[in-house]
Image: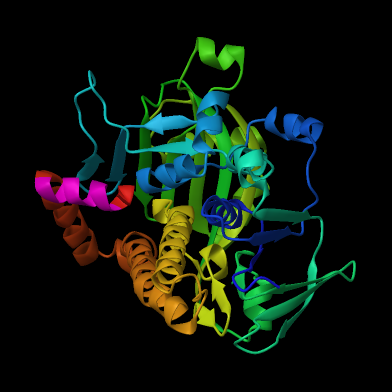
Amino acid sequence: MKSNHTLIIGGGIIGATLALKLAQAKIPVTLIDAAPERVADDWQKVLSQRDARVYALSLASINLLKEVGAWQKIAQSGRKADYSQMQVWQLNGRGELLFGEQDNTHPQMLGSMVEPLVIEHALWQRLFEDDVSDYLTVIAGQKVTQMDWLGAQHGYRVVLEDGQTIDAALLIGADGRGSFVRKQAGIKLDTLDYNQTAICCAIQTTKPHLATARQAMLPTGTLALLPLADITDEDKARPQHWQSVVWTLPRNQALDLLAEEPRTIADKLAAASNYELGAIEQIESIASFPLAAQQAKSYVADNLVLIGDAAHGVHPLAGQGLNLGMLDVKELFEQLTHDFARSGGTLWGAGQTLRRYERLRRPHNSLMMHSFSALNWLFAGELAQTRPIQQIRSEGMYRVGKIKPLMKLFAKQASGV
């Protein structure tokens, strides 16, 4: 076993991005993903359909994807919707927050909305290209069935379902909210159930989105209207009319609504947004997921570290879940390679390195998680609808919206750069 061999379990966006960063730095890495590898025809089939879900990629996440050579492929595909403004408002009070420059002649990009499979496709293309192949091994369609710690000097031995074993000095869990790695390491979770369900869908509206991401703060929860890329010739002839929707509702109310006909859902959705973008002409890909926040009590153990959703999951209110995971990737890579270089190539994944990563990332992620929870509490639920809370909320939004330097600071924080 190579002394600095790294094993990443989970080949989603977070795991694949880190694998590419390590391979580019000539660090031997193996990436294991339970999902079978898709051939070109499979990718073409899934990408021919519009996905209702999008990730709101910050500038920091875009820069990281550029570094690993994936963003160039996303841009070439045309399957992205850049946005230059973010609008946040409440229906039952005054005040509106508008992020971004209002100079339409030279709009500055705040981020980009990209469908998950579009990002994954770009990353998986990169995983098999010649410039990283000497240092990167990809194993797809195999689940990890066993993890054995062999001591600090040796790291982990992992057993796959086909009986294959792999040894690694450092094991990285990038395997999502239900992380097998986290469970096998005995790391517990702090959880918070919001008793809310998010309905997501794709809609075509009568008014264009004008490269603006919108979020209405409703008494029932948040309603996000996010720009979608135009993928058909018909879309491109009438651009900027497709949006991705994430509509947060109390769980029982969401389940009742999901039982309705699509046309009824579309009409109620348009009414809930106060017809901000007019009527809804088409609705498709209606789905839902329960909302809960969680954070691992520790991000690290001996020879083991968690990143992305395996370490933390936040409310989708601000669309920052993936961006927080990408910042994990950036920080972990920097700490690992810094100590490796400083030690003359002898120190890899040491306890002190992993703990420094945890000290830098866990408090930040925790602050984000609790901030989103507080915002959700401030706008949704019975207490949030009492007159004192409404007045405080309205006055706060109104005053904050008038302070331009503060608004620019918020926008900079959201960009991650």
161 to 154, vertically: above or below: above
User: Residue 136: percent from the left, percent from the top?
Assistant: 66, 54
Residue at x 45% of width, y 64% of height:
337
Q: Is residue 406 magenta?
A: yes
The part of the image, by quadrant, that contains residue 77 is: top right
- Camera sees residue 34: yes
The part of the image, by quadrant, that contains residue 344 is: bottom left
174 to 14, vertically: above or below: below
357 to 227, vertically: above or below: below
Point out the image quarter for the N terminus: bottom right
Extreme residue in the right direction: 162
Looking at the picture, tell me which residue is in the foreground, 266 or 70. 70
User: Residue 343: percent from the left, percent from the top?
Assistant: 43, 74
The residue stretch that appears in magenta: 405-413
308 to 94, vertically: above or below: below
Looking at the picture, tell me which residue is in the foreground, 256 or 316. 316
Residue at x 60% of width, y 52% of height:
16
| Side of 152 relative to 359 (left or right) | right
User: Residue 115: percent from the left, percent from the top?
Assistant: 57, 39
Q: Is residue 129 magenta?
A: no
Colour basis: rainbow
